[in-house]
Each structure stands twice: as C-alpha cells, then as structure tokens.
Amino acid sequence: MKKLLISLFTLSLIIAINVNSQSQILDSPPQDGLFPDMGMIDKKPVPYPPLRKADVMWSKRIWRVIDMREKINQPFYYPLEPHNGWRSFMQIIMDALKEGSITAYDISGTDEFLVPLTYQAVMTRQIDTLHKILNRPYPPYDEYDTVIYSEFDPSKVMRLRIKEDWYFDKQRSQLLVRILGICPVMMKEREGVEIPEPLFWIYFPEARPILAKAEMFNRFNSAERRTYDEIFWKRMFGSYVYKEQNVYDRRISQYATGMDALLEAERIKNELFVFEHDLWEF
C-alpha cells in the first residue's frame, strides 16, 4: 500500500510538472520570422512642414468617414486578436488611452477638443443597457422586465470620422492637408437598424508618435512595413465626405439624401481638385 501511494504521488508530480512546463511562456522563444526583430518597429512621425499664417492664402475644413468594411480599409479593422506585432486601429487607440499616452475628448456639436475624458470615463460610457421582457423558466412562467448590460466591444467600431484642414501654402505653392482629429464610430443595432454612435475624438498630432510605432498589415508585400501614421500621411485609405465647412454648420445628410447626397460628396471632393488645377492653368 505504501509503495502504491508513493507511485501515485510520483506520477501526479510528473503530470503537474509537464502541465506547468507547457503553459509557461518561454523567455527566449524560437525566432518566428526572417529576422529577430520581426513585429518590432521604431519610427518617428514625418514632421510637418513649417507653416506661417501669412503663407496660407486659402483653406477649407472637411469631415470624412473611413468605412472599415471597404476592402481598402480592412487593415484598420483586423486583426481581431493582436499577433506578430499587429493590432487593429481601435486596439491601438484603446491601449494608448489606458496607458495615458493620448487623450480622448468628449463629443460636441462643433467637434472641438474641449472636454478631456479619462479611460475609465470612456469605458463607463460604453456600457450598453438594454431593457427586455423575458419569461421565467419556472412556473407560473410569468413575464418580468430585466436590464441586460453589455461591455464595450472594439470589434463593433467599423467607422472612423476624420476632421481635416485643406490649405494652400503660397510659400511652397502647394495644396496640402492636415488631419486634426479622428473619431471612432460604433455601429449599434436598434430594432433591426444599424445606428452610428460616435465615441470620442482624439487629437491626431498627439496620437502620431503612437501610430508611427504601430505596424499596419500590408496585404501586398509584408517586407514593406507600413505604420498607421504613414497610411494617413500618404492618404492610403478610402473615404467619403459627409460635411464641409459652411455657414449653416450642416452635414450633407441634413439637406440631401440618397443619390443626391453621394453627388454632393463628390462635388465637394471635385472642388478641391478643380481649385488646385485652376491655380496652374494658363
């Protein structure tokens, strides 16, 4: 009996050691990639060109929407789970907010950066409450009212709003653009209809150092390592205009719908092209 107990104890000890060794992450895992620094990137944002107020002879503010469901914008949405140094755009923003590297600003009617929000305040606001009437699973099976709480799910953020200023620099004779803010938009379903709900604004120049170190998946060539900052800098995304600066402070959806709204958005984009073209037409 004593030998049997010793044998069982030894066997359980061996099993425990094997389980612990399998679940433990190695300090120096095998090289997963062509180079040991795969997944690590250390870049600085491309500096803005110097700008004087006296050199800006024309400017216009534009608001755009980046829909992550479009094929060209899918690298903003994926991967859903971080791996190999890749994270989705929303995961990068939430991690930076949690670390305090960037600041979130409350949504306002004028889209200004006025009221800062903490990470805890952002997460508290995204707790969704849904009232439902359910039947009890036991007699008398009567109905009762309950509240269902759901936590914030980054995968439901499928759009980004961008606020940017287009301007003509007469010192360089160039039509340039600067992104000022980015607003994640969550799609919430209400009675079978998807309703966009903006979460918060982030000041883009403040977020650039974070985005410059975050690698974005390149579906054409993995050897060319692009960062989110470079994607915004090179305008390598698809978007459509939903508002331009106007005296009424109206969005396109407030005075045009359907095909008329699409044509109005294209008109605004074309005006920028025509303005730059006419400057150099002799």
Image: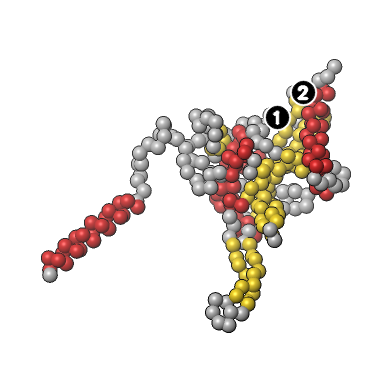
**Quick one: SS at disc 2?**
loop
Position of residue 125 measured from the top left corner of the image (x, y, whole percent): 64, 60
> What amino acid type should be assigned to the residue bearing mark 2?
Ser
Tell me where residue 144 appears, x and y as whole percent. Answer: 63, 77
Q: Residue furthest right?
A: 247
Residue 10, position in %: x, y?
19, 60
The answer to whether residue 260 is left or right of residue 121 is: right
Name the mark on residue 107. Answer: none
Residue 55 visible to an observer of this rendering = no
From the top left corner, tell me how far across and down residue 183 is, in percent.
68, 47
Q: Nearer the viewer, mark 1 or mark 2?
A: 2
Q: Residue at x 23, y 59 (%)?
A: 13
Indicate the quadrant where residue 195 lies.
bottom right
State the quadrant of the N terminus: bottom left
Q: Read off the residue under disc 1.
A: 50
Q: Earlier in the sequence, mark 1 or mark 2?
A: 1
Q: Which mark is residue 173?
A: 2
User: Which one is in front, 209 or 68?
Assistant: 68
Quarter-of-image position of residue 9: bottom left
Mark 1 lies on a secondary structure that is: loop
